[in-house]
Amino acid sequence: MREQLHIIKIGGNCIDDPHELGLFLSSFATISGMKILVHGGGKMATKLASKLGIDQTMVDGRRVTDAQTLDIAVMVYAGLINKKIVAQLQAKENNAMGFSGADGNLIQGVKRTSSSIDYGFVGDILKEGINIHLFETLLQNRIIPVVSPITHDGNGQLLNTNADTIASKIAIALSSHYEVILTYCFEKTGVLYAVENEESYIPILTKEKFIQLKAEGIISKGMLPKLDNAFEAIEQGVAQVAICNAQNLSAIGSEQVIATQIINQ
Amino acid sequence: MREQLHIIKIGGNCIDDPHELGLFLSSFATISGMKILVHGGGKMATKLASKLGIDQTMVDGRRVTDAQTLDIAVMVYAGLINKKIVAQLQAKENNAMGFSGADGNLIQGVKRTSSSIDYGFVGDILKEGINIHLFETLLQNRIIPVVSPITHDGNGQLLNTNADTIASKIAIALSSHYEVILTYCFEKTGVLYAVENEESYIPILTKEKFIQLKAEGIISKGMLPKLDNAFEAIEQGVAQVAICNAQNLSAIGSEQVIATQIINQ
């Protein structure tokens, strides 16, 4: 039987609020066994860019990462956020170690070229881009990798990379070795029928229902890429995928779970 | 016979100039066997603080690290500089992995309290603060640790820490396991008799001569703490200690070395 591995992705508002982040990390710290934390960036990078007078160009709701914006993303994501999380986990006796994709060649990306739009220094990940051997070595040594949303192309270029996608690709790659439980934590209870009603969360979401709710416009905007990543994971061998509020993390795996479970059927 | 381990410290102007840094990293990449790179911060953090309108308080020529200044140090040192170096070394087929002291509890510091002045979030390192086991595990796995000048106190607090001291403490701690060759690289040829004359470097510096030159005012200012760290290393078991220009790194260990060798006698 394969060993269980928890992969948790934390993002959005939870990272911007030190109190919320602290509560989340206390919860994360109590998960026993092997685990990996993937974090996003929150709004700190945008704020810093604004303070420095660096204009943020958006195309179709996505930020274009020019050289200056990439430097800020690296500073904030792989620097400030990553190291604060690692230091806090160390204080909770969790042996965390922070990573960008460049560190130990953990995650190799390629500059996005498929689109007609130039997004700048934005990276996509191939399945082969995940360094399974290094993840195994770290986990065997009881190290908890804390992964920031920065990858590299192997030629010296760092790349801004979507954290939801990183979590999904790591989960898929490690599913050949572990029974992976992937949990996306954010500020909502789960995928909601009505965005303003936290109690309207969908407990179980199949692909069929997702397609239907998407067509009806009930699921839209930022949830779509997150769910695409979630369904890709469950379809490619990840044992369990859930989306939940960061504060409900401790119930994941129990009967009392309050989350949207992504189901492969 | 103990295996050889190179510990190189790079700092100052070399980090601020991408061309100089590139040349240095090409040189570093050719060193065979086990190696560790420790880097300082250069002037980027001061520039960023200035752009953000954060005042830098100096006491006796040392920067006071308040909370905002610490955030900038973490962003620039453990984020931008560290990840750029790691990505460039990966491109040169050096399996580099970046660290702050918090990552894997690599280096634990204590907030400086010995002085009558409050320097803020500045850390000092105890010899026991160096995680020898983790360094060994990394080196055995052919990983090249790239260490930024940020440590942690084990209670969740990151600390700004002198990179020269980090290099010295790592060298001393690992001397029980390896034959350590410690090299401080900077923008000068070595310790100079006349600061404006690069050819006036002192090839061999004993403690006695150091004390004499200090008394005569020939060695002063920023060189003093660097040399204190260098002598501490050579007196506590490090096999070789040298100070040289970053561009002369490739000759270290050869007959043609252009550097100041620190001698324990």
Image: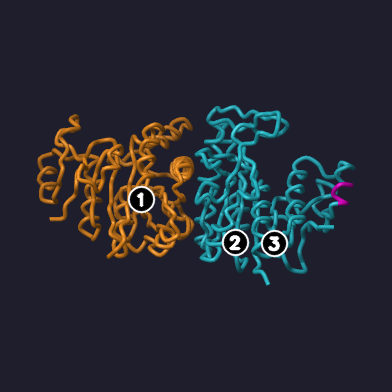
Chain colours: A cyan, B orange
Whether tag 1 and tag 3 are in contact, CB under 8 A, the answer is no
Q: Nearer the viewer, residue B169 or A151?
A: A151
Q: Which residue is mark 3?
A: A181
Give me the residue at 66% from left, 51% from top. Answer: A169
- Which three-letter amino acid code belongs to the residue tagged 3? Ile
Q: Which residue is mark 2?
A: A26
Give me the residue at 47% from left, 56% from top. Answer: B103
Whether tag 3 and tag 2 are in contact, CB under 8 A, the answer is no
1 and 3 marks on the same chain:
no
CA gap between label 1 and label 2 equals: 43 Å
Describe the element under mark 1 as helix, strand or loop.
loop
Queried whether the magenta region covers residue A247, the answer comes back as: no
| Main secondary structure of the magenta stretch | helix
Describe the element under mark 2 as helix, strand or loop.
helix
**Tag nearer the camera, 3 or 2:** 3
- Which three-letter amino acid code belongs to the residue tagged 1? Ser
What chain does badge 2 belong to?
A
Whether tag 1 and tag 2 are in contact, CB under 8 A, the answer is no
* Left or right relative to A201: residue B65: left
Mark 2: give few (<14), some (14-19) or many (20+) Cα within 10 Å: some
Q: Which residue sits furthest bottom?
A: A1
Q: Which residue is mark 1?
A: B32
Residue A107: % across, % down: 58, 49
Point out the stretch of residues depicted in magenta. Answer: A208-212
- Name the quadrant containing residue A115: top right
**Tag nearer the camera, 1 or 3:** 1
* Left or right relative to A254: residue B62: left
Mark 3: give few (<14), some (14-19) or many (20+) Cα within 10 Å: many
Give me the residue at 48% from left, 32% from top. Answer: B52
Task: Please indicate, yes or no, whether residue B239 appears anywhere in the rendered image.
Answer: yes
* Left or right relative to A73: residue B16: left
What chain does badge 1 belong to?
B
